Image (cartoon, rainbow, N blue to C red):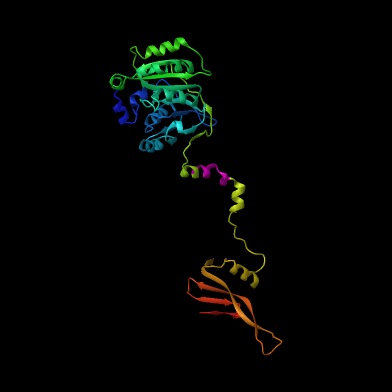
Amino acid sequence: MPRLESLAVGGYFPTSPEVVDRIAAMIHPTSHGGRVAVRLLDPCAGTGAALQQLAAAIGGETYGVELEADRYEEAAQLLDHALPGSAFSARIEEGAFSCLFLNPPYDLDMEARRLEHTFLTGMTKLLRPGGLLIYIVPQRRLATSARYLASHYQDLACWRFPDGLFETFEQVVVVGARREQPVSDGATRATVEAWALEPLPPLPDTGETRQQRALPVLPAGDVLFTSFTFDPDEAASEARRSGVWTHAALIERLWPPEERRVRPLMPLRRGHLAVMVAAGFLDSLVLESGQRRLLVKGRTYKVSVPVYSPDPEVEVEREVLRTSVTVLDLRTGDVEVIDTGAGDAHRA
């Protein structure tokens, strides 16, 4: 394909829904939940449509990474978990995924190496042994990765895209299961090299009978899937979900639950009332009793009062605290003021 065309779309060639349907028909639908999970990873997710379509057909929890900002925004809406940026700039747990859906950019990296092969070698470690690889590349690029595919994967099979789709970019689909340990397998390597040159059969139609491949199940729970780039919003969300502020003992110490209303055993004295007013408990408080609704506002203030002086020529004063409580009857409009300085109550 022309390099300029590849650059124009950022190496992005989305997988056709027809191809995804045919791939899904090769995979045994998974059952999971509770203590086990099936995780599907697409490190070049695009809009997330292909992985979401695959998961809808076979089941599984979806994880995707996308470099281009607009496509990432779409993927974040479709997938269970999505990261912006490059998959090589993300922290992703090794061996945590049941299926690696890999349709990498068709281009060269900064060191003139094929990106298809770079993604294959870099992402394989994320797939658990026995996990399923779905590798979509131009047919002629298989020769570059023949040795790696043969040593790291077993039970390999390859098909070309269906007629009408293959002619555009001459793409093929390779499927295989990750080996427990890499081995030297010259025969399989020769087979993959032949696939890069020889005519291949098309992907089987969804109605054709074939042996389905099973996906391994994994222990349920969170896995490491985050970006090296610091995102304040993501960090705040994670802190609210599992940070130190979620510890019940800390929350209770810093923000104790509201105290329930209680009825005192004995009537409050003036001293108690003064303390409540000074503490702000009677600041525009609405009290209800039967048909009465009262708005209560209290205040504490200082006044100077004369005190005894042994010298009749010298006046001595002392500051004392006085308390007043103003009560407005919200039904009648009557106002009553209780002032310790005045010594009694009066109405207005």
**The furthest residue to the right:** 310
Q: Residue at x 40, y 38 (%)?
A: 77
Rendered residue at 67%/67% (across/down):
266
Q: Looking at this view, is 19 or 290 the one in front?
A: 19
Please state the horizontal and vertical placement of residue 281, each as a whole percent of the image: 57, 65
238 within the magenta span: yes
In the image, residue 147 sits, relative to residue 233, either above or below, namely above
Q: Is residue 26 visible?
A: yes
> Predominant secondary structure in magenta?
helix
Left-right relation of 39 to 198: right
Q: Name the residue at the front extreme.
A: 111
Extreme residue toward the top, this view: 187
Observer able to see residue 24: no
Which quadrant of the structure image shows residue 28? top left
Total number of numbered discs in the rendering: 0
Most extreme residue toward the bottom is 313
Judge by depth and name the residue closer to the eye, 39 or 200.
200
Q: Quadrant of the N terminus?
A: top left
Q: Position of residue 348 (x, y in %)?
A: 50, 79
Residue 94 picture location, percent across and down = 52, 28
Magenta-drawn segment:
237-246
Is residue 205 shown above or below 281?
above
Is residue 68 rendered magenta in the image?
no
Q: Quadrant of residue 342?
A: bottom right
Residue 310 image position (x, y, % from top left): 71, 87
